[in-house]
Amino acid sequence: MASDVEALAKAARAASRGVAKAGGARRAEALRAIADCIEGGRGAILEANREDLAAAREAGMQGALLDRLALDEKRVVAMASAVREIGGLADPIGQRVKEWRRPNGLRIARQRIPLGVIAIIYEARPNVTSDAAALCLKAGNAVILRGGSEAFRSNRAIAQAIATGLAQAGLPAEAVLLLPTTDRAAMVELLQRDEEIDLVIPRGGEGLIRFVAEHSRIPVIKHYRGNCHVFVEATASPSMALDICYNAKVQRPGVCNAAETILIDTQIAATFLPLLSQRLGDAGVELRADARARALVPSLRSATEADFATEFLDLVCAIGIVEGIDGAIAHIERFGSSHTEAIVTGDPIAARRFLDEVDSSTVVVNASTRFADGGELGLGAEIGISTTRLHAYGPMGVEELTTTKFVVEGNGQVRT
């Protein structure tokens, strides 16, 4: 197994050089070919997915987990469309992000280059296979994919379509490699290949991410929890605040950018909290509130301290009453997970303070936390959301899969 993983990592490293040198137009051509091959190969992809679904049902999987695993004609077409959209994004490689001239006449610039080889370890959703491959290729990288065992057949069929598209465009098939086993020992071996792999991005539950971080010799971009907050400040429009809180909690509660805690300024709690509890209660949300909130609405369930640190991923929400913006920021500093925080306010000074002093990866004024998403922020797509500060923070699109090098141009200067 160790020799097989070593060979796979070395093949990806060799392929990464070809992808980086291919040029933006050729990489875009490859992504168009991959999208066509995914659509053209949807029969094989759907058949593989049916086998995965049958095995998953036999193993007892149900509900939302089955839905994440399932593909149909519409979802496969959407996968291909996403690859085409990524292919149409501006090419970041070679872009000069900053330039300046030194007193001695040297011209200095920072120029975008690929990271190299990226390993992506993920669970459940087969569409991650095509999304991750497309984003990495667009940024000039090679990628090694390790999906979950429940989607192994689906991922293999998608990877085959990707390999066909790469070959059609004249790029090395080894630029996108699927780890050919779901054995955890192979994943651990992959995480030791720091000479060939430049970055690891795990996508999945907190247990998977912690396992990867603990076993990797390669830098890891982590996304542990999305414990997101909405703070309703004293000057907020009640109708706007209700709409934002509702959307942030109810629209899709099982995702990482859904609100898990709503904080209310004590100045408006007596009037706003009953409205909020009614609106969210009618939507089936279980509210767990602190003592000050329960004094205003006694029917609310009592919140524990652990509730304020929990990513519920469900129709459950913690409610806290705080002393103005200072209290809100202090609460977020104590319980937040560096994902996304929002303030609803009519006061531009409060808005600016919140933007400046809250250091989560996405900070929002007068809008839902649900906008913390690569597509919604105009990145085209995302590889994940980083809650660590290792080179990228927040939603990671194509640019976040690059780094920069210094480019120095002179006309004979020597250092004295």
Image (cartoon, rainbow, N blue to C red):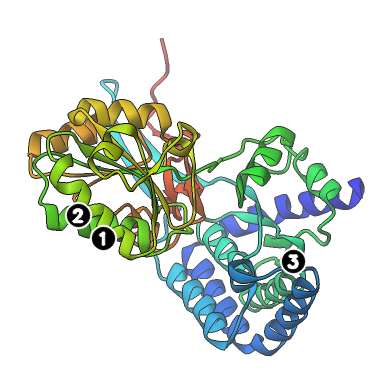
Location of residue 65 with respect to 325 vertically, above or below? below
Location of residue 81 with respect to 27 vertically, above or below? below
Closer to the chain start, of discs 3 and 1, is 3
- Residue 408 seen in the current view: yes
Amino acid tagged 1 = Arg
Closer to the chain start, of discs 2 and 3, is 3
Read off the residue under disc 3.
Answer: 150
* Other-residue count near label 1 (Cα within 10 Å), few / some / many at <14 / 14–19 / ≥20: some
Residue at 29% across, 21% down: 104
Q: Measuring from the top left, give residue 175's x and y in whole percent.
A: 67, 61
- Tell me the distance, in whole angstroms, between the alpha carbons under discs 3 and 1: 38 Å
Residue at 53% across, 43% down: 223
- Tell me the distance, in whole angstroms, between the alpha carbons under discs 2 and 3: 43 Å
Amino acid tagged 2 = Leu
Residue at 61% across, 75% down: 169
Read off the residue under disc 1.
Answer: 279
| CB contact under 8 Å: marks 1 and 2 | yes
Within the image, what quadrant is residue 134 found in? bottom right
Disc number placed over residue 275 in the picture, else none = 2
